[in-house]
Amino acid sequence: MDREKYEELVTTFFEWNQPAISQIFAELLSAVAAEGASSPASLMSQNYETARANPEIHMLPGNLKDARDAIFPYFWGTDSWNNPLHLENVRGPANHASLIGVLACILKNPNLCTDRYSQRSNELEVKAITTLANLIFYHTDDPWGVFSIGGTISNLYGAKIGLERVLPGAMRTGLVGERIVGICSQAGHYSNQTVAGWLGIGTTNLIEIPTDEHLAMRIDLLESKLDELYRSKTKVAYVCATFGTTDGFGIDDIESIRNVIVAKSKQYSVPMPQLHADAAVGWALSMLTDYDTTKNSLRMEPGLLELVKRAQIHNRGLRFADSVTIDFHKMGRGHYPSSAFIVNRREDLKYLARTVSETPYFSDADASRDPALFTLECSRPAIGPYSVIASLNGIGLTGWQMLLARSLELAQRLKDKLETIEHCKVLNAGTCGASVNWWVLPKGRNAEEIFQRLVRNELTPEQIARYLPEIRQLFDKRLKSMDPSLDARLGFTTSYGYRPNGIHIPAWKAVFFNPKTTEAMVDRIAYSIAEL
Ligand SMILES: *Cc1c(COP(=O)(O)O)cnc(C)c1O
């Protein structure tokens, strides 16, 4: 081989050429900053037509700028969601403390499978998990957990522990023809379906309990469903409570769920199902747990203070969960993927444990510090721990309390504004969170009255077929007439979670994750709806 060419290649791509690398970083940073001058999501139109027809690989070795040029159009054509008019969904701009953490992480590129491949980064994972566990479970003794690639996978871990609880050895033997079910609420995330399907339980064996109007699982219906299941000798592997539903921020009463499953498993002499809390969205409220509402050192207005007190009451519920899912990449404003699965008692991980002989690859692994002995994944990125610890310590608990309170404040402001419009109905008025779900009907309709008649099952099928599509039509009408530099981008859901009489209810949606969103932007939403 041509030794000279080889050396040149190695120098270009494996030596740390700081000026060359920093220059490209600086260029990319400038490009991100330039995004501020354009409206959200209008950076560059997509070109899927030839993405498959034109696969690409250069023939000759180039340099770092070739790497830059190869990805640049896609980088430029991707919206970072920094614009404060983005309110569509549970994503916002990632914070810059996280950016520092994550950049540090990728410079070292640790693999969290075992600490041989990650050294102190593995220690950082333990620190990040323990910190989050103490926020969630509030000064717990022996928590443990791991970062995964998303809330779906974190929920999968919770469900898998439940499966092993009620069917010991399922990891080896499979489900052996038993009927096994998992339970969540009708407002739960669709990842519950994914999990039931992928675990082999089957999506038809995922039982969705209806919610009340505040999107919380109906405890009475959970109780009667458990009676029915246990009487028919069905095994219940887990109950996945939701702490902050994705559309409307509904919060299940986890303490009551625990009381019911404890009582029922005793009554029928069966093993307790795993009580997992899917707090992918809502976990961040736990930052508010320790805020002293009497001292009120952040000088929150009375209305906001009430919301904080309500959040504090909800937060207590988390302590009754066996395990939780936390998506730091949602309300933690961290980078993807930063999801954590955390158990309150470390011993519960025994349900997932493999022996060293089952992982010959990691023959020197030590179960006390090497997650590969129980994780679903083998290689695991360390982005989560770096994002979490950098963000928590850069921003600080008080900083987080300000960010959280601001989200609650803006959501409440929009709710209050919409309540004054007759042809609007706020659907999640009673939830305490960062999102707003509502109806917009044509002017002249009384949205509140129509909603109440829907709940009481007094609407004819014809009326339902007329009213519900109007909500979408008006959403589309606003899309056509909106000024992208002034009007916020809103989301739409075909079913926000509450299903009176089994009816899926569509809704407009706004999520306040962007710290730069202003009162004026919120007020303009209400104004533009009144003008539709
Ligand atoms: C987003 C979300 C999930 C899935 O999380 P990913 O990180 O997107 O995989 C699960 N549950 C809830 C409540 C969510 O909002």
Image: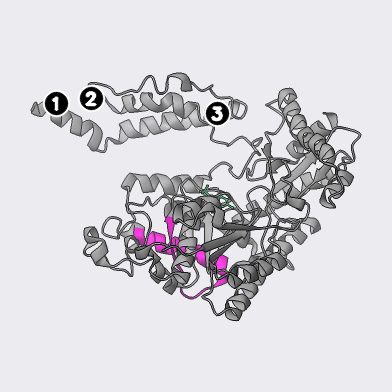
Q: Main secondary structure of the magenta part?
A: helix
Q: Residue at x 59, y 51 (%)?
A: 189
Circle 2 — which element? Answer: loop
Q: How far apart, in angstroms, are the residues tagged by discs 2 and 3? A: 31 Å
Nearer to us: label 2 or label 3: 2
Q: Quadrant of residue 119?
A: bottom left
Asked whether 451 or 181 is in front, the reply is: 181
* Pointers 1 and 2 in contact (C-beta within 8 Å): yes
Whether label 1 lies within 8 Å of ligand 1 gets the answer: no
Numbered tag placed on residue 414 in the rendering: none
Q: Quadrant of the C terminus?
A: top right
Q: Looking at the picture, how far across and down is residue 519, in whole percent?
A: 75, 41
Q: How far apart, in angstroms, are the residues tagged by discs 1 and 2? A: 9 Å
**Extent of the magenta region:** 122-147
Q: How far apart, in angstroms, are the residues tagged by discs 1 and 3? A: 39 Å
Q: Earlier in the sequence, mark 2 or mark 3?
A: 3
Q: Residues within 10 Å of mark 3 (few under 14, many from 20)?
A: many
Circle 3 — which element? Answer: helix
Q: Is residue 100 left or right of residue 401?
A: left
Q: Quadrant of residue 41?
A: top right
Q: Quadrant of the N terminus?
A: top left
Q: Amino acid at mark 3?
A: Glu
Numbered tag placed on residue 35 in the rendering: 3
Q: Residue at x 37, y 50 (%)?
A: 381
Residue 382 vs 32, above or below: the answer is below
Q: Amino acid at mark 2?
A: Pro
Q: Is residue 131 magenta?
A: yes
Numbered tag placed on residue 5 in the rendering: 1
